Amino acid sequence: MSDNQSWNSSGSEEDLEPREEPGHPVGIAEFSGVLSKWTNYIHGWQDRWVVLKNNTLSYYKSQDETEYGCRGSLCLSKAVITPHEFDECRLDISVNDSVWYLRAQDPEHRHQWIDSIELHRADSGYGSESSLRRHGSMLSLTSATSGYSATSTSSFKKGHSLREKLAEMETFRDILCRQVDTLQKYFDSCADAVSKDELQRDKIVEDDEDDFPNTRTDGEFLHNNNGSKEKLFQSLSPKGINGIDFKGEAITFKATTAGILATLSHCIDLMVKREDSWQKRLDKEMEKRRRIEEGYKSALTELKKKSHFGGPDYEEGPNSLINEDEFFDAVEAALDRQDKIEEQCQTEKTRIQRSSPVPPGDVYSSTGTHRFSDKVYRREVEENGIVLDPLKATHSVKGVTGHEVCHYFWDTTYRNDWETTIENFNVVETLSDNAAIVYQTHKRVWPASQRDVLYLSAMRKILANNENDPDTWLVCNFSVDHDGAQPTNRCVRAKINIAMICQTLVSPPEGDKEISRDNILCKITYVANVNPGGWAPASVLRAVAKREYPKFLKRFTSYVQEKTAGKPILF
């Protein structure tokens, strides 16, 4: 087979692929470029270098990695290309259960990709009428033959009597073959004898004309003296040629054929008797196959739903396929998992602390009990369908000062120790010792989109109007814009306006004792006005706020108590 021939998986030769000769290019040129590909619900859309070549779509992490091999590929012969109904830049390519979600830079680029893919599919010859007719005919012929063979074989194995009759038919066939060979030899001999007889008759006519008696080599006269002719050949008698008894052979042949007919009749009777049982078995098998096919289709449908459930069509968005109840359940399940992980970490931390010696005066961390008094107030406000509920929470914690609470809330050094919802953050710009612009991304809770925030954070001490006013500190975080952290398609940019006001209340100690942490109480007022952006349902946002804000305050103040226990008081 030459190099420009190809074979399919069954070993049959297919059409010759065109070979590219100098000056005569054949086929569609390679098409490549950058497309955004949906990876998973954690990382979302990521730019990938996509190459369309030889009716195959492959993607690489970047153009520089093309020489190291692709990260995935799809054969486009049976692929289904679906432009998205709402997103003008998106196209979905599916082959069986595998689906690629792709986005182009703009609608024009999407049309270019779709046109190129269709050109490659057409150039590959897939789906041509002649190809389908040829392969379909071969498949039908093979299937029919194999089906007939399988049915015949299974049928002939039914019952001992039927097998015996078939063995008899094999014996009769062998006998018939031998008889036919014998009769054929007899007929050939007769034909040779007739030919010789005609030749001798011609010679006799010539001898009569010359009036000469002729004799054969065996001494037999062809004519007597009276001119009468004798019998020419004794071999023409039925027993004269090779000793064959033609009459006996004919009788035997007739008996053999009669035996075959009788055996065939018996086989037909056996098959008729078994027809009812075979029909019942066939009906049962067909019913079993129908149930299996229905189960397969149902399982395949469920599998497709599960495989696509994490796709971009089921995440937060204006055209999301997930309803509000499913959205709520998914978010609540994700938050429950986070709480469980946090609880396990806290349990491990408590176990370690109990196994280590407790510093003197560290009553808060050793007992693990804290005095809290908190209230949360909310007012439901919506603007253009977006929840903007302002929130106010009050909280009191014993043993820490307002300065300490604000310090640990503002300082990004301790941020990851108590804030469990942040994925990463960085200080974009430091404005002063107590002011900085911070960019942070929050952990994604699927199916909600990931959020990021860019805000200015400042900490200040509020000057007292008179000496009786409590010592008060303030941390204020509000959203700003900065060239170093522009919004991206990966996250939804949230807007915040948050203030934490902390007042230190000191009760006089008994006698001449020094002020200790037992004499200190911090009153915290937390005010937040958050615009989450995006398209998350209002019920979900309100439920998350109601659930998470008290936990956040409790978690943070517990952390401050642990950090300040046994340390000098910071007023």
Image: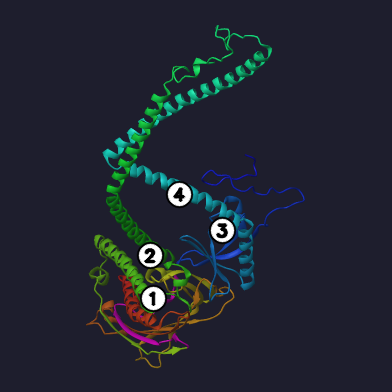
Q: Earlier in the sequence, mark 4 or mark 2?
A: 4
Left or right, 103 with reference to 403: right
Q: Residue at x 42, y 48 (%)?
A: 147
Q: CA distance from mark 3 to mark 4?
A: 30 Å
Callout in the foreground (4, 2): 4
User: What percent of the width, then of the height, locates residue 25?
Assistant: 73, 53
Instruction: Write down the residue under mark 2.
Output: 302
Q: Classify mark 2: helix, strand or loop.
A: helix
Labels 4 and 2 touching (C-beta < 8 A) = no
Labels 3 and 4 touching (C-beta < 8 A) = no
Instruction: Write down the residue under mark 3.
Output: 76
Magenta highlight on residue 177: no
Mark 1: few/some/many CA within 10 Å (<14, 14-19, 20+): many
Q: Classify mark 1: helix, strand or loop.
A: helix
Label number found at residue 144: 4
Q: CA distance from mark 4 to mark 1?
A: 52 Å
Callout in the foreground (3, 4): 4
Q: CA distance from mark 2 to mark 1?
A: 19 Å
Label number found at residue 327: 1
Figure quadrant of the N terminus: top right
Seen as rendered, the residue at the extreme bottom is 465
